[in-house]
Amino acid sequence: MSLRIGIPREVFPGEKRVATVPDVVAKLIKLGFSVGVESGAGDAANFADDTYRAAGAEVVQGAAALWAGSDIVFKVRPPSADEVALMREGGMLIGFVWP
């Protein structure tokens, strides 16, 4: 069974970035990961759900399902307290350092 990477929609007001793009999703899948992307996660960055599907990702409806089903979560911003509560036990968070 492969590790599952989850890409949630960023919840910080005004944040337009997404933690990874479809081209990188395809590379992660080639490396043996499965990838789930929360529906709408890439909208503000001009990446529609269909572009993630075409790259091989599963588009997941809702943050709770995405977080609960992910071994590793990629984020741009630090998670909110609500997001941390959604994380499954033993999960790992990978984020960018916010200056």
Image: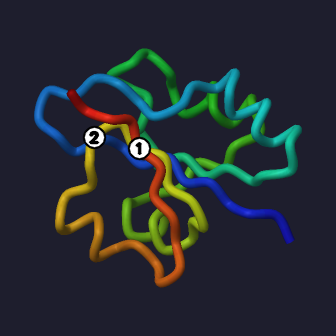
In the shown orientation, is residue 20 left or right of residue 16? right
Label 1, label 2: how far apart the Cα atoms are:
7 Å
Is disc 1 in contact with disc 2, using a CB cutoff of under 8 Å? yes
Give the amino acid at mark 1: Gly
Residue furthest left as drawn: 13
Q: Of the residues under marks 1 and 2, which one precedes in the sequence?
A: 2
Report the residue at 53% width, 55% height from top. Answer: 60
Report the residue at 52% width, 72% height from top. Answer: 91
In the shown orientation, is residue 21 left or right of residue 54? left
Q: How is the image coloured?
A: rainbow
The x, y position of residue 98, in whole percent, is 25, 32
Count of numbered marks = 2
Which residue in the structure is indicated by mark 1? 95
Q: Using the image, determine if residue 6 lies above or below residue 46.
A: below
Give the amino acid at mark 2: Arg
Q: Which mark is residue 80?
A: none
The x, y position of residue 45, in whole percent, is 39, 18
Which residue in the structure is indicated by mark 2? 77
Residue furthest top as drawn: 46
Q: Depth check: 95 or 9 in front?
A: 95
Question: Which type of secondary structure does the marked residue at label 1 adopt?
Answer: strand
In the shown orientation, is residue 37 left or right of residue 13? right
Task: Determine the image quadrant of residue 95.
Answer: top left
The x, y position of residue 14, in whole percent, is 14, 27
